[in-house]
Amino acid sequence: MRHLVAAAAAALMLGVAPAGAASAAHRGACTSDLLFCEDFQRLPTGGPSTLKWGTDTRNGTLSVERARRGNQVLHVHTVDNGRAFLRVDDLAVPGDRLYGRMRLRTDAFPTAPDWAHFTLVEATGSGSAEVVRPIGGQYAPTVPGTFWGVGADGGPTGDWTSWRESAPVVEDTWQCFEWSLDRTDNNVAVWIDGVANPDLTASTNEHGGNEVPFVLPAVDTVKIGWQLYQGGTTPGEFDLWIDDVALGTRRLGC
Ligand SMILES: [Ca+2]
């Protein structure tokens, strides 16, 4: 059985974008089949003023800014172990699969304290207490380096982040992040710039937490932004820019 699951997961993670995915939902094209979409183009600059999504902040701010060539993006700013999230509530996801996408540029990732841990995407819902973190990472002083890793907290599997040396963070560069949560086998998958990273995954019996099954919730809330959990960080403040956020039931493409 495990071989079958592994084969299916491998097939999923070979993950070439399905034909038409990129054209259907590339860069801010908010098509009606998406569960949520925000390209920030129609929002006034400054603090968010929209009924489409809410905010969750502590020692952090969100602001809509003008970028190049008329593009508008969301600037996420936090101090030390603060947080600032765009929050999508009341999602109704038909079926078992939820896909997400965002474009992201981060000024600098933490290099202190040791094991500084940060989350950029968090999903919660009913049926499981797991707070699922498909996009997050950790500073690993033993390498040293700062690496992406799938993680979770709040549920039976405990607090874990499977940071991977195959997924070093990149500063000051726009990258496209995609993730999927599939309740059929409790699979989490991640693509960076359209390329699947088979290390960035979790599933029912393959995850970084306690030796109990990992069960995905029926997601109704997704938070996208930044949170860092330990105080006394280097740098002392964090800045990232996010654009072209989308949630849907199919692979979204970049
Ligand atoms: Ca935009």
Image (cartoon, rainbow, N blue to C red):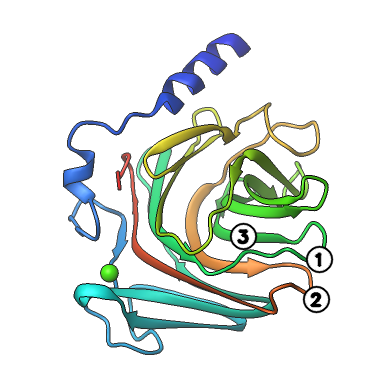
Nearer to us: label 3 or label 1 = 1
Give the alpha-carbon distance from disc 2 to disc 3, as whole Å. Answer: 17 Å
Residue plotted at (67% across, 28% down): 206
Q: Quadrant of ligand 1?
A: bottom left
Mark 2, other Cα within 10 Å: few <14 / some 14–19 / many ≥20: few
Q: Residue at x 47, y 69 (%)?
A: 87
User: Which of 105 and 49 lies nearest the eye of the viewer?
Assistant: 105
Q: Are marks 2 and 1 in contact (CB under 8 Å)?
A: yes
SS under mark 3: strand
Using a 10 Å C-alpha cutoff, classify the residue at mark 1 as few (fewer than 14 neighbours), some (14 to 19) or many (20 or more).
some
Is 38 displayed left or right of 207 in the figure? left
The image shows residue 127, relative to residue 72, as above or below, that is above
Residue 88: x and y in percent read 43, 66
Q: Cα distance, mark 3 to mark 1?
A: 15 Å
User: Does residue 142 appear to the left or right of 98 in the view shown?
Assistant: right
Residue 232's disc number: 2
The crowd level at tag 3 (other Cα within 10 Å; few <14, some 14-19, many 20+) is many
List the residue tagged with mark 1: 113
Tell me, yes or no, if residue 1 can be seen here.
no
Q: Which residue is mark 3?
A: 119
Q: Given the image, on which type of amino acid does mark 2 rest? A: Gly
Give the residue type at disc 3: Thr
Numbered disc 2: secondary structure: loop
Q: Earlier in the sequence, mark 2 or mark 1?
A: 1
